[in-house]
């Protein structure tokens, strides 16, 4: 348990640092690794941690919020949470782990392919991205790839994107946690250790923000998420079949 907790704390610290630098990345790094280490019940924990990190990041970026897009993204994201919560309640641990891993891998692939695509920033594309993000937040605690895909293909300015998505992530994760409940949260000591790791990660991210590019931070998040999602999928398949 000591080794497991240390691994979780390290991932949380790194994810918080990446989120502070790039505006996204915490859930992308933390969720697949937590699911791999703890199991599907880690999704609620990842959502809760994500809310805290996003609130801290939002406190320093709220002036850059794109209110026009936020008014479309937030309600659409909340709508997408509902089928995600329903699916996560219906699946057994093995199939759920496979689903989580595949959702993350699909989201990563879409985000990578998006660099070659261009889409108009219409109400339809904005809301569709919000729904997809909400669904992914509820099932896998990773709503970032859907919004990253949207931001890249619509050429959304990074500064406005990084501020606006914090509101979207906070609202989605809060609703998902509220619907799923708090039954499987860690004890007080572990919770305090996680909060300390988040604080250290945010401080580290702020310290290196001027020396590490947002692109470099996102690349690191993608690499960790790819490894975690692949391992989670394999573990889920083994649990499902054995």
Image (cartoon, rainbow, N blue to C red):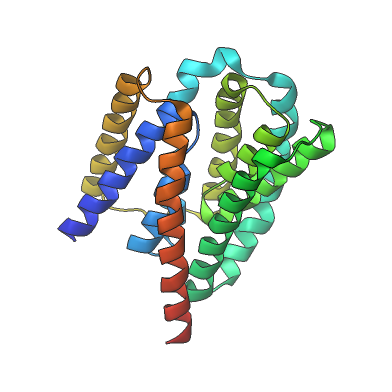
In the image, residue 238 above or below residue 21: below
Residue at point 41% right, 60% down?
35
Residue 67 x, y percent position in the rendering: 70, 20
Residue at point 73% right, 26% down?
69
Residue at point 51% right, 50% down?
141
Residue 13 x, y percent position in the rendering: 30, 38
Residue 124 x, y percent position in the rendering: 83, 38
In terms of depth relative to the viewer, which is nearer, 109 or 81? 109
Judged left or right of residue 56, residue 123 is right
Is residue 22 at all visible to an observer of this figure? yes
* Residue, far bottom: 242
In the image, residue 31 above or below residue 130: below
Residue at point 42% right, 80% down?
238
Q: In which quarter of the image is the C terminus?
A: bottom left
Judged left or right of residue 235, residue 188 is left
* Residue, far top: 63
In terms of depth relative to the viewer, which is nearer, 152 or 124? 152
Residue 187 x, y percent position in the rendering: 26, 52
Q: Quadrant of the N terminus?
A: bottom left
Quadrant hosting residue 129: top right
* Residue, far left: 2
Count of numbered labels shown in the rendering: 0
Is residue 40 at all visible to an observer of this figure? no
In the image, residue 118 above or below residue 46: above
């Amino acid at each position: 348990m000591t080794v497991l907790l240390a691994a979780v704390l390290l991932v949380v610290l790194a994810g918080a640092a990446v989120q502070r630098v790039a505006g996204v990345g915490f859930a992308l790094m933390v969720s697949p690794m937590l699911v791999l280490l703890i199991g599907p019940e880690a999704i609620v924990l990842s959502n809760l941690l994500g809310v805290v990190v996003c609130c801290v990041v939002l406190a320093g970026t709220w002036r850059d919020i794109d209110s026009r897009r936020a008014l479309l993204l937030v309600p659409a994201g909340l709508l997408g949470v509902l089928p995600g919560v329903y699916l996560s309640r219906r699946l057994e641990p093995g199939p759920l782990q496979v689903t989580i891993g595949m959702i993350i891998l699909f989201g990563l692939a879409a985000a990578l392919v998006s660099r070659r695509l261009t889409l108009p920033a219409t109400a339809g594309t904005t809301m569709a991205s919000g729904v997809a993000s909400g669904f992914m937040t509820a099932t896998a605690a990773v709503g970032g790839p859907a919004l990253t895909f949207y931001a890249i293909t619509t050429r959304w300015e990074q500064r406005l994107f990084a501020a606006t998505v914090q509101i979207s992530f906070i609202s989605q994760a809060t609703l998902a946690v509220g619907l799923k409940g708090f039954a499987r949260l860690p004890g007080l000591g572990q919770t305090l250790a996680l909060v300390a790791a988040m604080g250290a990660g945010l401080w580290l991210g702020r310290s290196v923000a001027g020396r590490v590019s947002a692109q470099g931070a996102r690349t690191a998040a993608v690499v960790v998420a790819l490894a975690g999602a692949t391992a989670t999928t394999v573990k889920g398949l083994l649990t499902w079949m054995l």
